[in-house]
Amino acid sequence: QGQLVESGGGLVQAGGSLRLSCVASRDILSTFNSYVMNWYRQAPGKQREFVASITSSHTTNYADSVKDRFTISRHNSKKTIYLQMNDLKPEDTGIYFCNRANAWGQGTQVTVSS
């Protein structure tokens, strides 16, 4: 099973931007290309929630709370997905996880100060 490794989190002021990355380091290319890839997040004291997804043909889907602010993309030959987050709000604070099927990354912390 592939390993998912996230990076790019950090501390940013409200209105700022961050770009998260997730590399499926152990996947063979055909495996990565066949999967829908997802971003989830978990705020302190809350359940993990869906943020965005992207299919192998680059069809995307977003949670209503992030539409028009976040953009998910993928670079298949690099086995990598991205989450460009703009106009960040304090309520976007949480640990962001990369996911496909039943595989999860370790998460990367995003903190947005007001």
Image: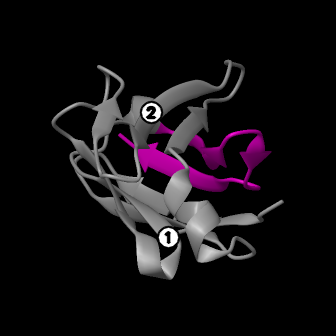
Point out the image quarter for the C terminus: top left
Residue 34: horizontal and vertical position, in percent?
A: 53, 54
Q: Secondary structure at mark 2?
A: strand
Q: Nearer the viewer, mark 2 or mark 1?
A: 1
In which quarter of the view is residue 101 placed?
top right
**Residue 107 in the image: above or below residue 114:** below
Q: Residue at x 39, y 58 (%)?
A: 12
Instruction: Find out whether residue 103 is within the magenta segment.
Output: yes
Contact check, label 2 and label 1, Cβ < 8 Å: no
Q: Amino acid at mark 2?
A: Val
- The residue range painted magenta reads 93-114
- Residue identifier under label 2: 51
Residue 71: horizontal and vertical position, in percent?
A: 26, 49
Q: Secondary structure at mark 1?
A: strand
Q: Which mark is residue 112?
A: none
In which quarter of the view is residue 52 placed?
top left
Q: Residue at x 28, y 58 (%)?
A: 17
Within 10 angstroms of label 2, few (less than 14), some, or many (20 or more) residues? many
Q: Amino acid at mark 1?
A: Thr
Looking at the image, residue 31 sits to the left or right of residue 51; the answer is right
Point out the image quarter for the N terminus: bottom right
Residue 105: horizontal and vertical position, in percent?
A: 73, 55
Instruction: Find out whether residue 105 is within the magenta segment.
Output: yes
- Residue identifier under label 1: 80
Farthest residue, direction right: 1
Chief secondary structure of the magenta portion: strand
